[in-house]
Image: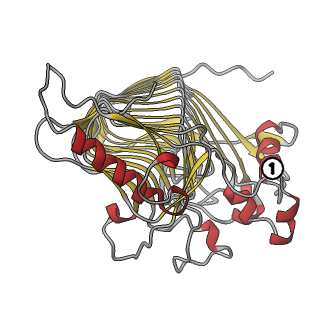
Amino acid sequence: MFDKNYYDVTNWDTGNPYEDIGEVLNSIIADIKRRQSDSDHCEGGKPGAVIFIPSGDYHLRTQVVIDLSYLKIMGTGHGFVSSSIRYNLPEKEWKDLHEIWPGGSRILVDLDVNPEDDEKDGAAFYVKREGNPRISSVEFENFCIDGLHFVDDGTDIDNVENTYVNGKTGIYVGSAQDSFRITGMGFVYLEHGITVYHADALSIHDNFIAECGNCIELRGWGQASKITDNLMGAGYKGYSIFAQNFGGLLINANNIFPRGTSSVTFKDVAKSTITGNRFHGFYPGMLVFEGACSENMISSNHFLRDNEPWTPLIGVDNGLDDQFGILRISGSNNSIIANHISETVSLESIKPADKRPVIIRLISGNGNYIASNHIVAMAELDAEASEACFAAQVNALTGRDRRRKLDVVHVLVEEKSEENIVLDSGSEKQVILDRKRNAFRATPELEAM
């Protein structure tokens, strides 16, 4: 049965979706608004619509502007494949690859973006509506947004496809909204994967967001949202997850892999939860709380910090030294409980070379509770780099033969931070704090055999 509120981009009479799906989508949105003009008809009136994108490659040369509620744009698959691996192979080897480009329902972002443009101008999908009620229930599901190429940003890097810069954004939400859902999507080679301002009840779930300069940015302010079950990893200049002025954010069951400048950065975030995630990074500052972060819980996560094993990006880092801390906390009354934190690095990579690396560092605030964290620090001997990205990272993760214990500071509490409690997260020698202004119970040490 034909449904007037169901659209197929390949069956629309305006534009060519393969040449410019942006023009087609904007035309469909205009049709929905034209037909659904009555806000109250028989206790209904504006049910919204579904727009379907079949499998295929669709160039986007016109930004899609969404200013209506209850719209779902859906495809047949997130279509992710590593563009970074391809671009770092000699082009003569491309002919032997099974696939060259991402697939599924794939949108190729062909927008012309200039450095002086506003950040929203490089967005494939721009969502914004002012007035009451807030725009609500816009959903993106099961298609791929591909930024195609990075560009030369003036830095000293051999391959411009490794800069993570192009001014492009996958989804940009510029106004307050309610109950948005981004599910089952693929994002690749975008400077910003998802940028959302003023989110309420936002769900970002089960997406693949990788080889983007930044993955998820929750900006402005927001509340009661979740980032769950995603596979993602930002570039060395950006965030895998960033949130500011947020309350009640749940970050759970994500697998966040390198090489973001941080896995999670909170700025003035309160009463939020980071639990049951696996974090992997190549640099210090994997988790950073800035400003007045308060009453947040970091629990039952696995953190791994090791060295970059892939030849094209060896020597690239986020500019932080090992005294910065793997977890760096500013704020009060936060709980850091029952996390496993592993650091496996080569002795040659430690900066500064004469200082002990710091795992958890409290910068400011008071009343923080750090308990029952298991910290394993090892020096990797004779680490080998590899041209094969996948094999290099698996070998780095699973290798155990050439390692020895590394002397690190488990917890460092700065003078500006006091009235904290540190329990069972390091021995007497592994925790540095003022014991007159903080409570401390050491992890028992085994007697020498």
Q: Amino acid at mark 1?
A: Ala
Chosen colour scheme: secondary structure
> Residue 368 falls in which quadrant of the image?
top left
Taking the spot 44% from the left edge, 67% from the top edge, the residue there is 167
Which one is in front, 316 or 390? 390
Q: Position of residue 331 (x, y in %)?
A: 30, 38
Residue carrying label 1? 392
> Residue 41 falls in which quadrant of the image?
top left
Residue 332 shows in the view: yes
In the depicted structure, whether residue 204 falls above or below residue 112: above
Dot 1 crowding, Cα within 10 Å, few <14, some 14–19, many 20+: some
Which one is in front, 115 or 51? 51
Label total for image: 1
Taking the spot 52% from the left edge, 43% from the top edge, the residue there is 53
Which one is in front, 234 or 8? 8
Which type of secondary structure does the marked residue at label 1 adopt? helix
Q: Position of residue 85 (x, y in %)?
A: 74, 58
> Is 260 left, or right, of 414 in this rendering?
right
> Residue 343 falls in which quadrant of the image?
top right
Q: Position of residue 321 (x, y in %)?
A: 54, 58
> Is 13 left, or right, of 65 in this rendering?
right
Q: Position of residue 95 (x, y in %)?
A: 86, 64
